[in-house]
Amino acid sequence: MKNLKEKNNLNNREAILNDSIPKTLFKLFWPIMVGNTMQVLYNLADTFWVGKLGTDLAAEIRKGEFKEINIF
C-alpha cells in the first residue's frame, strides 16, 4: 500500500512537471470550482429562506449585526 501511494505521488509530480499545462491546470482547479459552486449554492439557498422572513432581517443578517430578532 505504501509503495502504491509513493508511486501515485511520483506520478502526480511527473504530471505537474511534464504534462500539458491545460490538462494539469484542469486537474488542479476542478475540485476548487466544485467547492466554490457548492458554497455559492448554499449561500443562495440561505439568502432565499432568510429573505422569506423579511428584507430588514435579511439585511441585518448580511451585515452581520444581530440585534433582537422578533419574528412573531
Image: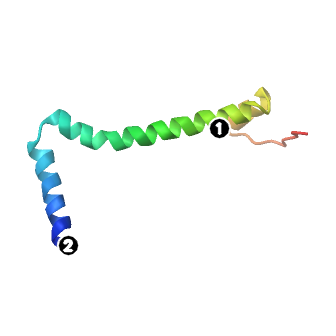
> Picture coordinates of residue 23 (x, y %)?
19, 37
Q: Please determine whether, in this image, residue 35 is positioned above or below residue 10.
A: above
Structural crowding at the residue carrying mark 1, measured as other residues with C-alpha within 10 Å and reported as few (<14), some (14–19) or many (≥20): few
Q: Earlier in the sequence, mark 2 or mark 1?
A: 2
The structure residue drawn at horizontal position 65% and vertical position 38%, both measured from the top left corner, is: 46
The structure residue drawn at horizontal position 84% and vertical position 43%, both measured from the top left corner, is: 68
> Picture coordinates of residue 71 (x, y %)?
87, 39
The residue labelled by disc 2 is 2
Quarter containing the C terminus? top right
Q: Are marks 2 and 1 in contact (CB under 8 Å)?
A: no
**Could you tell whether 42 is left or right of 70 in the image?**
left
Q: Please determine whether, in this image, residue 6 is positioned above or below residue 37.
A: below
> Element under label 1?
helix
The structure residue drawn at horizontal position 13% and vertical position 58%, both measured from the top left corner, is: 10
Q: Residue furthest left?
A: 18
Q: How many marks?
A: 2
> Element under label 2?
helix
The residue labelled by disc 1 is 46
Structural crowding at the residue carrying mark 2, measured as other residues with C-alpha within 10 Å and reported as few (<14), some (14–19) or many (≥20): few
> Picture coordinates of residue 33 (x, y %)?
39, 37
Disc number for residue 26: none
Q: Splitting the image into 4 quarters, where does residue 51 fall?
A: top right
Q: CA distance from mark 2 to mark 1?
A: 43 Å
Quarter containing the N terminus? bottom left
Identify residue type, mark 2.
Answer: Lys
**Could you tell whether 21 is left or right of 34 in the image?**
left
Identify residue type, mark 1.
Answer: Asp
Q: Residue furthest bottom?
A: 2
Q: Residue furthest top?
A: 55
Q: Please determine whether, in this image, residue 1 is positioned above or below residue 68.
A: below
> Picture coordinates of residue 63 (x, y %)?
68, 34
